[in-house]
Image (cartoon, helix red, strand yellow):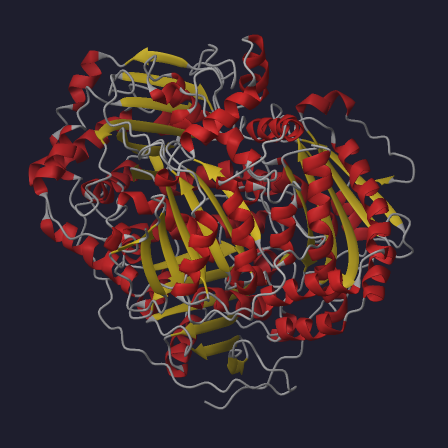
Amino acid sequence: MTTILPEPVKSPQDKRLYRRIRLANELDVLLIEDPDMERSSIKDDDASSMASSEADSSQEEQDSDNSEDEDGSGDEATAKGVKKAAAAMAVGVGSFSDPDDVPGMSHYLEHMLFMGSEQFPDENDYDAYLQSHGGSANAFTELEFTNYHFDCKPDALHGALQRFSQFFVAPLCKADALEREVNAVDNEFSGVQQDDSMRLAQLRCHTSHEGHIYRKFTWGNRKSLVDCPAAKGIDVRSELVQYYKENYSAERMCLAVLGGEPLDTLQQWVLELFSAVPCGRGPRPEFSNLISATVSQGGRLHMMPAVRQGHQLTVTFQLPSLLTAYREKAEDYVSHLVGHEGSGSLLSALKAAGLASNLSAGVSESGYERNSALFVFDVTITLTEAGLRAAPGNGLATVGFLFGYLQMLRTVGPQQWVFDELAAIANLKFRFAEEEDACEYVARIAADMPHYAPEHALCGPHLYDTWDPSLVRKLQGYSSPIYLKCTLTACIRTGVVTHQLCHDRFELPYVSLPLPAELVRSWEEPSEAMMRALSLPPRNHYIPTDFTLRSAGNADASSNGIQPLATPPQLIADAPGLQVWHKLDSTFEVPKAVAYINITSKAAYESPRAAAATHLAMKLLEDTLCETTYLADVAGLGYDVWPEGLSGIEIKVEGFSHKMALLTSTIVQQLVSLKADPQSFDRIREVLARKYQNANMKPDRHASYLRLRALKHLWHVDNILLELKLLTPAAFLPRLFRDTHITALLQGNLTADDAMEIASSVRAAFPDGIMPAAERPLDRVAMLPQASSLLHRAPVKNAEEDCSVAEVYLMAGPNEVRLRAALDLLEQVLSEPFYDQLRTKEQLGYSVHASTRLTHGILGFAFVVVSATFGPGHADERIEAFLRGFAARLDALSVDELDSNRQALIAAKTQKDHTLADEADRNWEQISSKRYDFLAREEEVAALEQLTVEELQGVFKALLVPGGPERRKLAVHVVGKPFAQKLTSAAPDGCTMLSDLAKFWEDSSKYAPVVGATPSVATM
């Protein structure tokens, strides 16, 4: 019998309909009907194609490397804003439940469920179906749950659910797939061994008490999943199947389904497909009653070497689990104050003392920090060199400031006005929430469902409805010096860290020392001078109060007869030194706006020194404004500023529109009057120097950077770093703001008058000369010689990195709509077979992908393999072999297969933007690139409709297949540690080695800049 549960409270902005049900097998389900989702009648659910899996979770990783990027992949990254159907299943068992004899079992099982089921036995059936219907899939394993999720075209939802449901009914877990997939797990593990955050997590596990669940090795690798079990006579497949049967039970699962169908239809589908999920294993495992509740011994300092340049001290306090106290959010109250960056904050005091450059505090969303056993409250302090060495050394001087701040909080007591501000801001963010990516949305909801009452399934993360000062005091009691644990991650290899083997899996050196009792006692009695520098934050005057919508009807028409998916912005001013674009929103109906401002100056990137000075100015601006802009950011109005190469400086302001003009003015006025005292200058320069030193640590980012250095004008990061060290406070910005041109886009809840007022104030702030629009510099892309095969080799930047990368880039030519359509359709058609062959079958590496590239208006296609087990030369050979073999497969492509892929691609390109920011980003891409092709999506769809099999085959054979008459290849090999001895300057047969990338760019013929005609100024 199906039970109807209370309907969740939703945002007033949310047009979707919700129904919470529990099936007879006790599967908990949230059904979501989106009435705006375009859908057609259900088609053949068993349609197959030659399409691609996106199950490679490494694609979701966020990377902070400071490598310069190109315009983007594909066209305007339209997939960012697609409106799709989606579903997610959160299974209430994770790595905490791994059997002791097979560490990593939960993660291994997650991989295996993608490898076919009794009803759909082909290993790539699920991925191929999704890709042929404009979708993708992924999964991740947490400590207490495993999350599987997908998205697809709305009319493919039923077929996708058919395949998805079989993960939880009858997966095959075939022996041959088991052997191959362990390589993927092992490659994934190899890829994180040089990641400082993963190393810190592993150290946290290893230093936990013996027998505590935190000691588990959750990643899994070949040794834990194959070698050690085999030595003990364990049949891993039998163990895995048994583990699945014992733990994958319906009452431990939460399913979220988002579609365009009526709720009754969605419910019927779920009943039809998921009622067969087995049940009867009882509720999900729960770990609140551990024999040893304390994770590790307090009062200790652990130290380990960092991979990246920089020093971080993490101060850790263990709290009781607060999963059921989500209405009170006492831990968020404490983290808000400890992690605040406004005046009187802990960070401000540390900066003033020259000890730290950044700080974060709180209980993260990771399962390591937030679970049923306990919460972990971390304060992570990014140390300066002075902060690392200040007495008593090892960054511990900063801990005294931390306990001074905690003492101040105890002295003033819990403050309801602080909680009320947090509640007001959270309410605004929920009230005016915009749509999330469909896949991310259902994945988050499914994971949240067990922890919130049914009516709070949506609003639970934003709910602050119970002020409990006693709980705040209780949590503050856990922040005693006797309970803390400090972990120092430092890039100094000698003198700070002595080598001691941490774990036979990570091979991580570290040292553990007790904190001196006298030092710990001193932290309990902070000095009066320190206490005078610390205070509660000021009240937040950036909290918006005006939510009036200024929207008006927009005419959705274009001059060339193409019906636009979204109304383009209008050019409302085009004067010497100032170009202003504007769009008053009438679609998203939220009191928000986005402002993009480009300040073009030839002096910004004319030399490595100029590039260093420009970037330093941006970092000094952020530091100077920190105490003010942090308040705005907390209130839902954020900004970013960055150097944009030849284009100068870009500023983005985004959030509630009420105080946008105030924040924009504050930013610009501070920029033009920028000064720095010697201490701040040295501190910020040190931060930026580390950023450049850490650039391209990830091998795949390194490969992309090297390719771009051959294709466009980029100063080498090492040269910029060298010049950065020579800059002085008196002479680092002498010419940056002479002769400038301002380009601005203001979009959202702002009138044209509002937009002109903001943009004009920006122009007025730069009176020292005007750059004519025609003189704005443009990036020029090197033209690879026809029928060329060029190769550049380089070692990995981190000598201990095992992963190598082969990136094969094939240049196509200027961004013409029919060529773009053909390349995008080729990506749609070949990416899944490419992934299936090189990743699944050949097991070359964990990360394998192929995509269209757009570099300043020049199209290309890139194939990338990241591998810890094979060298880049072998990966390059296998990429070429795949392309040779795929030619025959493409020749056999039927009209039906072409049309299936064509329609999937069109569906992705014709969906609406999720949010105001998505639409503004897309518009700004056209403005900043000076292409002004706001109907690029619509034009490409029209070209796709007309594209024939013969045209597709012709483009592939001319541009991509080895030996093609118009093929122009640039391969970049980044060589990891296992293959470093084989690094050679010799070129393989048929290749030309590139050693000096900058000289290659200088000597090459260049494409003409790909720019469009500037539209006429609109009448306001």
Who's the residue at 21% across and 43% down the image?
Answer: 337
Question: In the picture, residue 801 is in which quadrant?
Answer: top right
Foreground of the two, 877 or 788: 877
Depicted 552 relative to depicted 484: above or below: below
- Image quarter hosting the C terminus: bottom left
Who's the residue at 29% across and 68% down the image?
Answer: 659
Q: How many marks?
A: 0
Who's the residue at 41% across and 20% down the image?
Answer: 216
Side of 982 relative to 244 (left or right) = right
Residue 103 drawn at (x, y percent): 47, 20
Foreground of the two, 718 or 139: 139
Residue 364 drawn at (x, y percent): 33, 38
Residue 406 seen in the current view: yes
Side of 472 relative to 767 (left or right) = left
Question: In the picture, residue 656 is in which quadrant?
Answer: bottom left
Check the image and name the residue furthest to the bottom: 1019
Foreground of the two, 929 or 432: 432
Residue 437 seen in the current view: no
Residue 650 drawn at (x, y percent): 50, 61
Depicted 756 relative to depicted 301: above or below: below
Side of 479 relative to 681 (left or right) = left
Depicted 821 relative to depicted 239: above or below: below
Check the image and name the residue furthest to the front: 1
Residue 348 drawn at (x, y percent): 27, 42
Depicted 620 relative to depicted 697: above or below: below
Side of 419 relative to 335 (left or right) = left
